Image (spheres, rainbow, N blue to C red):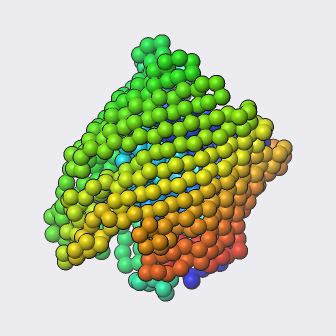
Amino acid sequence: MFRYSVLSAGLMAALGGSALARAADLQPEVVVSATRVAQTVDTTLADVSVITREEIQFSATRDLSDLLRLQPGIDIARTGGPGGQTSIFLRGTNNNHVLVLVDGVRVSSLNTGALTWETLPLDAIERIEIVRGPRASYWGSDAIGGVVQIFTRKLEGPRASLGFGTYGDISANVGFGQRSERGGFSVQVGARDYEGFPSQNRDGYSYEPKDHGLENQHLTAQGDVRLGGQTLAANVLRSQGTTEFAGGESDFTEQALNLSLAGALGANWQHWLKAGSAREDYETAAYFQAFLSRRNSLGWQHEIRLTDSQRLTFGIDYLREQGENRDTFSGTPVYRKSRHNTGVYAGWQASLGAFDTEFALRNDDNSLFGDETTGSAALGWRLSDPLRIYASYGQGFRGPTLNEQYSPGFGGLYAGNPDLSPERSRSTELGIEYTPVRDQRFKANLYSSRIRDLISFTGTDFQAENIARAQIDGSEIAYDGGFGDWRFGAAWTWQDPRNKDTDAQLLRRSKQKVSARAERQVGENLRIGAELLHAGERKDVYDFNLPSYTLLNLRASWKLSPAWQIGGRVENITNRDYELAHGYNTPGRSA
């Protein structure tokens, strides 16, 4: 496999007020993706992880997949280097079984059902919340494996950064933000030019000995203002550019806009009125194809504190969606379809002494595939201050994509089916958390999921039909803690994702994964760290086996002055030869 073994220097300088603090006590993060209202991680009855801006900054990476692959329960598949088609598998479920939100706005493609993860710029991200397990009773379609919500960058002063790396990787960002008691604003623009390496090796079906890279320009902006007891806020993320692959290139545009009005309607009554818009354009000239997605949303959510220990959350979501597959040679649509969806949901949460409970129910009415009702229930028992166990049950579903419903296929083969039903799931989970001191946390989870009515191209002339079933059993063990100037984290994932009818392992998902990190603050200005990732064997298409691999990465940051810091990262130090998809290259030792 192609490898670029020259180690070039990586440099990042950032202008801003962020300091490299010593490892602080482990404070519970506040999250909103699990139940759509603010909760600390240690009070949610779901398995939740948070990646903060500080962690993103210290990682010194520019690719979202590099961060997500270290998280328990997540597998990554990518066809080549940065810019290659990227798939995220959460708890063994399919790539389109993860609901992805940007500032509360759905961003997955209506045509494929998946997000083009490779087009999201990491410099535009403030934090990431990962909720494992079904969340359909709050969010509706797609949240079978879980939810990943991305929050865009918010600056509180001037910032500029410049980065250089192996494979001709150059990036630059500049932005400014300001805040006061009444509100504030933030805006940042950036660009990245990545020359890359050949995406395929000689085992690939269309190998060519030329570099395949990525060009990206992005904008993120937000503003908010207090209007009496209400806050009016707006967020926008726009990312556009070109990704190259063996045989051609694709032009992309990703955009998410959110406008909200939130505040108190009474002493114990909060509301959020939200309007959102998402757009994805993805055009590949070599295939004479363009996929266009448009999604507009409107929602009104309420939270009522019934007592000090009970609250009721309820709301309504409306989606208007339109997708198109266009033949760019003739300029005519292969299909152009629209649909709308109305979802009504309610959730009740209570703390009753040592017990925490949660119940949620949602009904979705879709203009194409009809009604779908999902529910969830969870119970937590705090045996002592540091020890808690919880159990949950949840249902999920995924509505068919427009490709699965309306694609004409290829010469009549592999055509869509407008009569498809949603894919449906049910999952159970048992979790335990132990926090002996504020700076140490252990957790373990056992889960089991059954998915039915999976869409498979196995009908007459390989037409799409609801026939396949999947069975996924798994467990996760994780630790996070600090000792003085040291901080450690480790996670072990075991899973058995299988086709229930054939007993075959689901593609590109390993049975075992181990990730670990160690960090140390050296004095006031230097911070160093290491990452270890091991992934087991995986099955790929055409019954190919992807061997296991182990990666070791190093990272460091140095505070030069109160305003300037420099960061660096060395990846794949052992120059390990491995594949995330059969026939596709991955980066060798690089900086």
Q: Give the left or right position of residue 130, taking residue 398 as reference.
A: right
Above or below, 414 against 332 in this view is below
Above or below, 386 against 211 in this view is above
The number of discs equals 0
Quadrant housing the N terminus: bottom right
Q: Residue at x 20, y 69 (%)?
A: 408
Residue 302 horizontal/vertical position (percent):
41, 25
Identity of the residue furthest to the front in this view: 501
Q: Residue at x 62, y 50 (%)?
A: 445
Residue 126 horizontal/vertical position (percent):
55, 43
Q: Residue at x 56, y 53 (%)?
A: 447
Residue 438 horizontal/vertical position (percent):
76, 36
Q: Looking at this view, is 425 or 400 the one in front?
A: 425
Above or below, 179 against 514 in this view is above
Identity of the residue furthest to the bottom in this view: 202
Q: Looking at this view, is 400 or 253 the one in front?
A: 400
- Is residue 279 at least partly visible in the picture? yes
- Is residue 157 at least partly visible in the picture? no
Quadrant housing the C terminus: bottom right
Q: Residue at x 22, y 74 (%)?
A: 460
- Quarter occupied by residue 250: bottom left
Residue 201 horizontal/vertical position (percent):
50, 83
Q: Looking at this view, is 151 or 344 the one in front?
A: 344
Above or below, 576 against 31 in this view is below
